[in-house]
Image (cartoon, grey):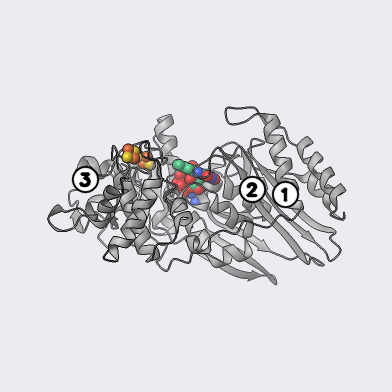
Amino acid sequence: MRYETPKELKECLELLSGEGARPIAGGTDLIIKMERTGERPDVLVDLSYLPLHDVTLTETGGHEELRIGALATISQLLEHPDIREHAPVLWQACTQTAGPQIRNRATIGGNIVNASPAADPALALLAHRAAVRLISRHGMRDVSLEDFFEGPGRTALLPGEMVETVEIPIRRPSGGVRKLAHFFKMGGRNAQTIAIASLAAITWLDADDTVIRATIAAGSVAPTPLRLRKVEEFLQGRKLDSETIAEAVGLARKSISPIDDVRGSADYRRHIVGVFLERHLSGEPVQDMDGILYANDSSSWIPVRRHAERSIEVDGVVMDDPLGAWDPSMRLLDFLRDVLHVTSVKDGCREGECGACTVLLDGRPVNSCMVPLGDALGRTVVTSEGLMVDQGAIGVEHRALVESGAVQCGFCTPGFAVTTHYLKEKYGEYPGEDVVRREISGHLCRCTGYKKIVEGIEMAFRLEEGE
Ligand SMILES: Cc1cc2nc3c(=O)[nH]c(=O)nc-3n(C[C@H](O)[C@H](O)[C@H](O)COP(=O)(O)OP(=O)(O)OC[C@H]3O[C@@H](n4cnc5c(N)ncnc54)[C@H](O)[C@@H]3O)c2cc1C
Ligand code: FES
Ligand code: FES
C-alpha cells in the first residue's frame, strides 16, 4: 500500500482520481475498518497536510454562513466560539461525541463520509440544514447533506471526489423571535458510546409561540441520519402548546421504523425519540456545559510539522529515516513499540476505546493506535517515558498516581500519566473533579476504579506546586 501526503489540493485530487485511492483524515473510522475487513487500498491519501482546517464566518448573498473545512476536528469545533454561537446543535453534538483523544483526531469530513446512521455531528448538521461542497479533478458541486446520505456507509460521493467544506446557513426566518436548539443522545454510557437513538432539532417560534420553522432529525432509527419531514410539516404554523407537542411526539414515533439490535429494541428507540422531541419542544434548558472544559485553546489546530518530513521527535529526541525504512501506513503505536521500543505506550484494544496507548501529539492527547505514522512525521510526540525526570526517576504525574493508590496492574497508568501532564499544562490549576472525570473519559482502568485516579491527578497538581 502506497501512502501519499499531498500538500496541495490539486495534487491530492490527482491522486484521488487514480484507481484504488482512498482518503484518510483522522483515521478513527478507517483504521478500524481496514483492520476488521482486511481492506487495503492501493493508495492511502493522507489529507492531514492540506489547508482545510479552518472555520470561517462568511457572508454570501446577504446571508451569513459558517464554513467548516473538512479537516476541522471535533475538539476544534468545541473550542471555536462561532460554532458555539451560530451552530449550537452541532456544538452540543460534539460534546457528546467519543472521548477527548478521539475528538482530537476525528474530523467533521470523516464523520460525514463515514455515513453512520448513529453519527452525532452529522446528525446535528442535518438539523442545521447544512450542505457539503464536493471537489474533484473535474470541478466542484454543492450537495445538501440530506441528499448526501444514501445508506449505511454510502454517500453521493463519486469516485475521485472528496469533501472540501461543510456549509451551515445562519438564517433567522422572518418573524422568528425565539429558537429552541437541542441535541440529545441515548447511549450505553456517558462517553465513547454509539447512539441507541438520538435527536437533533431546531425550532423557530414567533412572538405568540407559533412555529415558524422546525428542522428535526433522528439518529439510529433508519439506514441514514433521518429528517422527520412529517413532524416538521405538522408543526409548521401551529401554536406550540401541550396538545401540539403530544401530537408531534405521537407522529414522530409513528413516522420512524427503527430496527431491533443488540443495543436496543425498535420500541425502545421509538419511545426515546418521542421523549427527546417532547424535551425539545418543551424548551428544556440546554445543559450548561462547563465552559472551562472547552475553553479556547490558543495553540493551532493545523498540524505543526517542525521537523523534516522523514523525521519525528519522540520525548525530546529527533529521529530520522534517511533510507525510507519506516512504513508511514503503520500505526504510531506499533512504530513506538516495535521500531523505537518505547514499550510504556501500551497496546490494548487497538480500537481507540481504552486509552492505554495515549501519547501527546503536538501537545494534545491522542490514541496512538488511531494515528498513521505518516500523519505524525515531522511532529512532536511525548510518551509516558518522556515525563520521567533526570536519571530515570519518575515524574510528578507517575509519583502522584502511585502515591494515591491509583495503580494496580499499571496497564492504564502510562496513558493516565500522559493525560495528567496535559491537564496540568491546559489548566494550570486543578479544575475540579467534574472536569477531570470528563477529561479522562477516554481512558479505561480495569483494576482500580476512578476514585483513586482522580485523587492522583489532583495530587499531581499539588506536587507541581511544591507540596
Ligand atoms: C472509540 C471511538 C468512539 C467514537 N465515538 C463516536 C461518537 O460518539 N459519535 C460519532 O459520531 N462518531 C464516533 N466515532 C467515529 C469517528 O470518530 C467519527 O466518525 C470521526 O468523525 C471520523 O473522522 P476521521 O477523520 O477519523 O475519519 P477517517 O477514519 O479518516 O475517514 C472516515 C471515512 O471518510 C473518508 N474521508 C475522510 N475525510 C474525507 C474527505 N474530506 N473527503 C472524502 N472522504 C473522506 C475516508 O476515506 C473514510 O472512508 C468514534 C470512533 C471511535 C474509534
Ligand atoms: S485506545 Fe489505543 S490501544 Fe486502546
Ligand atoms: S491499574 Fe490495571 S488497568 Fe488500571
- What residue is disc 2 on? 184
Q: Quadrant of the C terminus?
A: bottom left
- Badge 2 local density, few (<14 within 10 Å), some, or many (20+)? many
**Tags 1 and 3 in contact by the CB under 8 Å rule?**
no
- Nearer-N-terminus badge (1/3): 1
* SS for dot 2: strand
Residue 115 versus residue 354: which sits nearer the camera? 354
Amino acid beneath label 1: Arg
Residue 17 in sight from this viewpoint? no
* SS for dot 1: helix
Amino acid beneath label 2: Phe
Q: Give the Cα distance between marks 1 and 2.
A: 9 Å
Residue 256, placed above or below residue 85: above
Residue 439 versus residue 327: which sits nearer the camera? 439
Q: Give the Cα distance between marks 1 and 3.
A: 49 Å
- What residue is disc 3 on? 342
Closer to us: mark 2 or mark 3? 2
* Disc number placed over residue 279 in the picture, else none: 1
Q: Which residue shows up at 67% across the image and 62% down it?
A: 169
